[in-house]
Image (spheres, coloured by chain):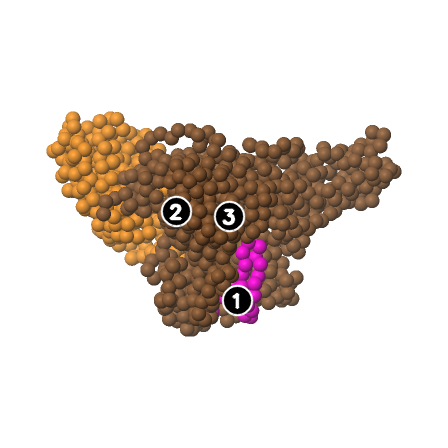
Chain colours: A brown, B orange
Amino acid sequence: MVSTEQPKQYRVIGSRPIRHDGVDKVTGRAEYGADVRHEGMLFGAVLRSPHAHARIKRIDASKAEALPGVKAVVTSADFPGAEEGDLDLGEGRANPRWLLDNLLASDKALYHGHAVAAVAATDQHTAEDALALIQVDYEVLPAVIDVREAMLDTAPILHPELRTAIRARGVEKPADKPTNLASHLRLEKGDLDKGFAEADVIIEREYETAMFHQGYIEPQNATAFWNRDGEVTVWTSTQGAFSVREQVATICQVPVTRVKVVPMEIGGGFGGKIGIYLEPVAALLSRKSGRPVKLWMTREAVFQATGPTSATYSRVKIGAKRDGTITAAHAYLAYEAGAYPGSPVGAGAQCAFAPYNIPNQVVDGLDVVVNGPKTAAYRAPGAPAAEYAVEAVLNELAEQLEMDPMELRLKNASKEGTTNAAGQPWPRIGAVEVMEAVKNHPHYTSELTGEDVGRGVAMGFWFNGGMESSSSATVNADGKVSLILGSTDIGGTRASLAMQLAETLGITSDDVKPHVVDTDSVGFTAVTGGSRTTFAGGWAAYELGVQIRDRMRERAARIWETAVDKVEYRDDGTIAGPDGKQLSFQELAGKLSATGGMIAVSATVRMNTPGPAYAGHIVDVKVDRDTGKVEILRYTAVQDVGTAIHPSYVEGQIQGGVAQGIGMALTEEYFYDDEGRLRNASFLDYRMPVANDLPMIETVLVEVPNPGHPYGVRGVGEVPIVPPQPAIQQAVYDAIGVRFYKTPMSPRVILEELLPE
Amino acid sequence: MQPVKYQRATTVAEAVRLLQEGGEYARPLAGGTDVIVQARERRREIDYFVDIKHIPELMHVRHDANGVTIGAAVPCYLIYGDAEIVKTWPALADATHVIGGTAIQGRASLGGNLCNSSPAADSIPAMIALGAVAHIVGPKGERDVPVAEFCTSPGRNVLGVGEFVTAIRFAKPEPGSGAAWQRFIPRNEMDIAVVNAGVYLRLDRNTVRDARVAIGAVAPTPLVVPEAAQALVGKALSDQTIAAAGDAAKAAARPIDDMRGSVKQRRHLSKVLTERMIRRAAERARGQG
């Protein structure tokens, strides 16, 4: 580990205890959505559109309803309707009317796999048989699935009422006519023309990225029970129980307090389990049937209908002086939103140039609807595509300037005080530290030999999130502490939060027992997303610890009949008073009941100092010219992680992000036919890398503590997905002398480029 | 999934009777790694499974003086785990080792892979290269069909109602011969072939005396390429003759464009894999592989 500042001495933080939920998970006892069983429970199935774009003229479910065993059928007409609005989902937003329309299509099916109707029956097979009995009359419409084609005047229109929202100075308001361009935003700093005029070298390139899916192992699932008293309970796999509660309450028009969401263990999310697909549908089926209803998705439905990330087109132009000083940069980013507005292009726009101090810059971001699934957050939403284009141009620029690519980056690196695209100064960040660690790493300085081998390098940036977290804790008589959490645990946050409480109290990680609970049992907590949980939840845990320390001191003072300020709480958990009196945490815990009662505390924090994250990756590849296949020979991921609370989980997050980024670079893509039907809705044909496609991914943890957190935590989970695409693009170029401007660089793409016509 | 009938047969005769009674939509069930998935997803109409795993001879690997008979339901792991097979028919180990993943290899069988008759089946070009023969039993008695002639179109084959494959026979390779199989996939495992190729060679010093070349995923059925074999037989093995055989394989391939590969890519890979497998088969023929 590289520490850049005088490290604080910690007892628990930085160690690698066994996670609290480990035994349940490895022995199969942990309960996931698929394990939910209730008396009288029905099983549901969802009918999906076979067309990419079609008017729904009529739905006749009478034959399905008549099938023995079928207890309820719902369509969009069964929902109470939704009003226009803006729901904050934590990492992304949703207009309730579009959210509802995505749950069950109303007048039009807008993508292949769009849900049209749902059935609840006494068993799964009957529910599936009933789907075949639902008659839907479609009028098939022409579909558009490409972002640039969708912006043409001749393109089929998805939403006749949609008009472009202009969030940019100097962009002319388009004519008042139907469009697929939902919004156009612009970020501006300095004087672009002046900046380019000062440049000696200008490079402008176009890039495309495919639609990528998060690929979580566990499909979406939801079980709902709408009780006759109007109380709705939902058991689901989600990144944010409170976000599900909000969405269900809004869509079902039930007061929020009457909805209880029980988060089950979650088998991966990566941003994809923030929006909802099934919960209100299960709730409606339950209300109609009077019984609990369970819905879960097939893998095919997951690929067809749950949020992938945007396919994108971008154009990036960067100008620099002969000495490498970047004078101006322009990025034009067009992101597919899927069937409803709301791609992550805004985040992409803000990330594009974030690692660099560029005085004159403009970023245009376009949000475009197409006949595909509504995109959802995916690990650093919007950042990989934008930064891929920027980093790839920088690598070309370094070559033209005959500069070391890391030298070029260091020369232009963002530092504390550099203003970003939004005009805000950066707080203490570790961009320079990461760049230097890359440049000095033995991987970077080693010689690469062999035929058709090449090396690439790239940086990545992600903001990280703060937002709201609540937590409570009770000190038990045995000296252990129960920690109640509202954050669902995707990446080891039970451990990382328990460790921060343990550190604050001077007890061990095992002395803290974390529980993830339902929405009635803890204060409001935003989603596990935005790399925010260890940051914000950790802050809440720290505050709980401080409160417990104060209460323990008060109690000791009472026992010793002395003033509270004479009692010291030491870092090792010892409570010390005058005349050498002292009690261990455990001893004092055992006396609580008899001396005034147990101690229970709670905390809610809302902190806006999450500490941005920077990453720098180095990759060596070998290209097989006969097959077009790229082998990753060596991969090193350097990252500023603030303070690594549990280094193993930090490393795991980095390796996971790299694995997904390698998939984006080399093999993953949505494959649509000419009619807009998805042809590879399976893990067999949507090719995510598996373990033996990857080398051991070496991680280097740079620790530049976040001054905006008591333990210096920065989010770590998202940024590692950003650098792989440009780093591998450069490595492939270095190996075979061909630059690809499109990901994935699949064997087919590489081979066809190398073969003579 | 529709309700299905299931019956376990314990003798070949009983399986024939049950399959005949079951009619057109009855299927033998071995490992079930294809048919159960197809039935669940309604990709194949099936209303009756006759489980053949409990017929003793279908689960046996029987070596004799002239070769080996592998029961149709023997799972892959027992094939690549059989030291004699690995030594004598390494091409068979090449293919069975990569079908699905470890868990699938615990159930999936050669008989199942053959009867599923996918154009991209991993084991079929290997079996063709090795000159394998399928032993078929049915209401009208027994018959032997070379694996090379077994598949008729995607998912279809020579089996009639009530017929099923009980075993696959591999003759002992002639001295001086070698065979090899490989597929190309974008990943390294858990994938389906973009193209695959199996090659058998018999060498006399450096002269090719006999050859068989089969390629998969480039036509409606796994494809035997006699032109590739002809490019080799009677000639000294050289870069030139190997390239000629590769070109013949490329010329014979008539692939489609789909999400797994393009026409251009598959035609080129037919050549690349054929040439690579000729070299590996030659190494094995010389006792170097």
Q: Amino acid at mark 3?
A: Pro
Name the residue type under label 2: Ile
Mark 1 surroundings: few (<14), some (14-19) or many (≥20) residues within 10 A: some
Disc number for residue A97: 1
Q: Earlier in the sequence, mark 3 or mark 1?
A: 1
Q: Which mark is residue A203?
A: 2
Q: B196 left or right of A97?
A: left
**Residue A17, image quadrant:** top right
Precedes in sequence: disc 2 or disc 1: 1
Front one among B10 and B199 = B199
Tell me the crowding category of disc 2: few under 14, some 14 to 19, or many 20 or more residues within 10 angstroms, Cα based.
some
Q: CA–CA distance between discs 2 and 3?
A: 17 Å
Q: CA distance from mark 2 to mark 1?
A: 43 Å
Q: Which mark is residue A359?
A: 3
Q: Decide which of A110, A227 is in the foreground and name it.
A: A110
The quadrant the N terminus of chain A occupies is: top right
